[in-house]
Each structure stands twice: as structure tokens, then as C-alpha cells.
Image (cartoon, rainbow, N blue to C red):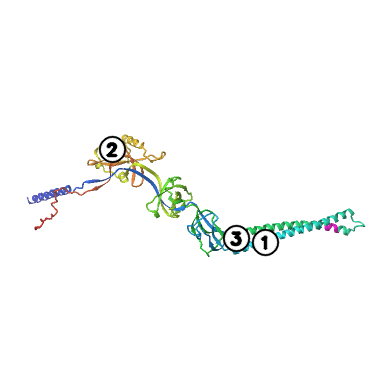
Amino acid sequence: MKIKKILWTVIGLSLAAAAVFVYLRRENAQPVSYRTSEITRGDLLVSISATGTVEPEEVIDVGAQISGQILKFGVDKTGKPVDYGSVVTAGMVLAKIDDSLYAADAASAAAQVQQSKASLQSAVASLGQLNAKLYQARQDWERAQRIGPSEALSRSSYDAYKAAFDAATAGVASGQAAIMQARAAVAQSEAALNRARRNLGYCTITSPVKGVIIDRRVNIGQTVVSSLNASSLFLIAKDLKRMQVWVAVNEADIGKIHPGQPVIFTVDAFSGETFKGEVGKIRLNASMTQNVVTYTVEVITDNSSGRLLPYLTANVEFEMNNLHNVLLAPNAALRWKPTDAEIAPEFRGNPLNTSHKKGSSTQKSQQKAVSEKTPTGSRASGQPPRKQGTLWVRQGGFVAPVAVTIGPTNGILTEVQGGDLKEGMDVIIGQQTVQTTPVGSTNPFVPQMRRGKAGGHG
């Protein structure tokens, strides 16, 4: 009897513990609450982000073709020495290089030309004398030939006339060659003079174009050394009213860039201000840095205001899609999926409730009707068809699916289309568990604090 009594006591305590557990679980149940967000209507910009540098559209590097010391700089329109930011015109003197050695070379070359010309005149005069001797020798030789060797003309005299004629003929030929040599010497000395004068002219550095000096790379007294490459003295921007942004675009995105594509960009110098431009050229000489291949894209922008300065860092957005007045859903709403128990009974097992399954004929007809509606600025013809997705809305204590066609996204919002979509509709983006305790209920196993009345004792 004692054992049975103990057994029944254990069973009773077990049942009581189970009852307490069920009670506590019911009392501490955590109902599910959904986090929602509204479907909004507005504009959506889908873009590719990159970083670039503002560059002048055309830059001329003015160098020195000779070596020498910088003596002085030219003056700009304001009468000040040429410096950073100076406005220059074509032909304006930028700098002067010490020309003493080059002036001496030019003077020496000029003297050499005069000497060569004098030698030519001497050769011409000598040729005249040789021609006169030839004439005399020819006359004597012709007379000797008519008489011939005889008692009137000895054989030795006959041979002497012939030798004199041959020598005079050779002398004329030599004189003609001397003239040709003298003329070549004149041409050579004149070429040397031109070279010396050209080098002397290089001592004066002039601007080849009209523009603005954006860099001065020498100082007065500095010696310029010219080797195979001309040394750089000044950097001139031809027109700062038209600028370019050189943007490094990753190879994964370069296929989405094309000439004429709209571009917006910002610079840190003017925070909050947006500048516009368009793609001008895609350079084909790619560069690789740490195994990352990038292409340089030239973006053309108008700088009539002159606010953009060379070499500013630009944060560039290449516009892929620019949609206007479209319905927008949070990306979180398209990613969220409910459990089967959360779905309204009439939608359970319906292909409509999961976006990764093929829809029913009703769903397909709805999606076809949706795809035929084209919002302002939507995808152009020839692009691939849009994907299908599902949004979820609350329906009583459950959730119900809404079939949508998914458009472009900017990473936060996605353009969606659907016959049942409306602006302001709440769609589920997640769920949260709320701890609730029924009013008037207490846990008998938790000690209760006694509250005393004001002014009294507990």
C-alpha cells in the first residue's frame, strides 16, 4: 500500500508539473508581428559608381629644345611675370634662356657663310683665267696642226703645243670642279647658319596656343638640360571651359558604358553640388593593378562657370536607367519569404506564393499584362525580359502573395509592376517577435513585490 501511495504521488506531481509547464508556455507565448514598408511612387536612378580625376580637355607641354640658364620670364596681359594661372596668347614670350653661346655660334656661322661665298667668287675668277688659257692653247694647237712637223715647226714645238692644249683643257675642268666645291661649301655654311639662328631662336620660349598656365616647372636661374627629350617648362591648358573626367571603370562594368551615356558627378570642393556630363570615349589600353583590370573612360563636361579646377577628384555615376514616376518596393520585401504556416490557407500550395516556382496560367496572364505597361524611362527594346517576383501583404492573421514584375534596382529600392499594386500599400519586409503578457495575469512562481500606499507602511 505504501508503494502504491508513493507511485500515485509521483504521478500526481508529474501531471502537476506538466500543467504548470503548459500554463507557463501559454502565458509567455510570443505572437509574431510583421515589419512592413509602403510601396512608393517616384524616380529611380540605376547607376555604376566609379572614381575619376578632372582633367583639362587639351593640355600642351611647353619644353626647351636647347640647354641653358633661365634668365627671365615673359609678362602676361596684366604686366606681371608669367606664373601659375597666367592667361597667355599664341606667340607670347614665356621665358628667356641665356643666349650668349648661341649668339656667338650664329655669328661664327654667318662669318663662315661669307668666307664660303668669297671662295666661290675666287673659284669663278680662276675658272675665267683657265678658260682664257684654254683658248690660247687651242689656237696654238690648231695652227700647229695645220703646219705639222716640218722645217717651219719643229717636232718638239709641235708636241709642246699639244701638251699645252691638253693641260689647259684639264685646268678648265678642275676650275669647274672648284666652283662646284665652293658652292657646296656655301650651302653647308648657310645650313650651319640656319641651325645656329634656330638654336638662338629657341632661347626665347613662346606660347604655341592661347590658354592658361596650370603649371610652371622652372625658376629663374635654373639650368635647363635638353637631351633626347625636350625638358618641360610650362603646362598650358588650351580651354578650361571644357573639361574631362578620366574615370577608371572596372572590367566587369565596362560593357555597360557607351559614348553619349549621361553621367553625373560630384567633387569634394563643392559639397552637395552635382555636375553633369556624358561619356566621350572609352580608351582601349587597359591597365592592371593588383590583378584588377580597369579601363579609362573620358567624360566630357561643360565648365563655362570655371568652377571645376584641374585634377579634382570626382565621384562619378554612370546612368544605366533613369525611371520616372514608377512604383518602388524595398529590396527587403522581395527577399522575404514566409513559412507555410504563415500563408493564408487559400494560397498554400499555390505556385503564386513562391517567386522561384513557375506561376499558374492566371499568374502568367497577370504578369504578361504587367509587362506590357511601360513607365517613363523604363527599359529600352532589345533588353532581356524582366524577372518575376512576389511581395507579401497581411491578410487577417496570415500573409497573402502579390505577383509582381521586377525592374531595375539601385540596391535599396526596386521598380515593380503588378495589377494589384497600389501606391501606399504595406508590404512585409520582415518579422519581429513581441513579448506580451495578458492583462491581469501573473506568474505564481515569481515572487510578487508588495506595493505600499503613499504615506503608509508596507
| First in residue order: circle 2 vs circle 3 | 3
Which stretch did the figure color magenta?
160-164
The front one of 90 and 408 is 90
Q: Residue at x 36, y 42 (%)?
A: 324
Q: Nearer the viewer, mark 2 or mark 3?
A: 3
Question: In the rendered structure, which amino acid carries the disc numbered 3?
Answer: Leu
Q: Residue at x 77, y 56 (%)?
A: 173
Mark 2 and mark 3 in contact? Answer it, CB < 8 Å: no
Q: Nearer the viewer, mark 1 or mark 2?
A: 1
Q: Is residue 229 in view from this perspective?
A: no
Q: Main secondary structure of the magenta part?
A: helix
Residue 101 placement (x, y as % from top left): 60, 64
| Residue under pointer 2 | 350
Between the C-alphas of marks 1 and 2, the distance is 105 Å
| Residue under pointer 1 | 112
Q: Secondary structure at mark 3?
A: helix
Between the C-alphas of marks 3 and 1, the distance is 17 Å
Q: Secondary structure at mark 2?
A: loop
- Left or right of 69 on screen, residue 407: left
| First in residue order: circle 1 vs circle 2 | 1
- Left or right of 178 on screen, residue 89: left
Q: Is residue 17 above or below residue 384?
A: below
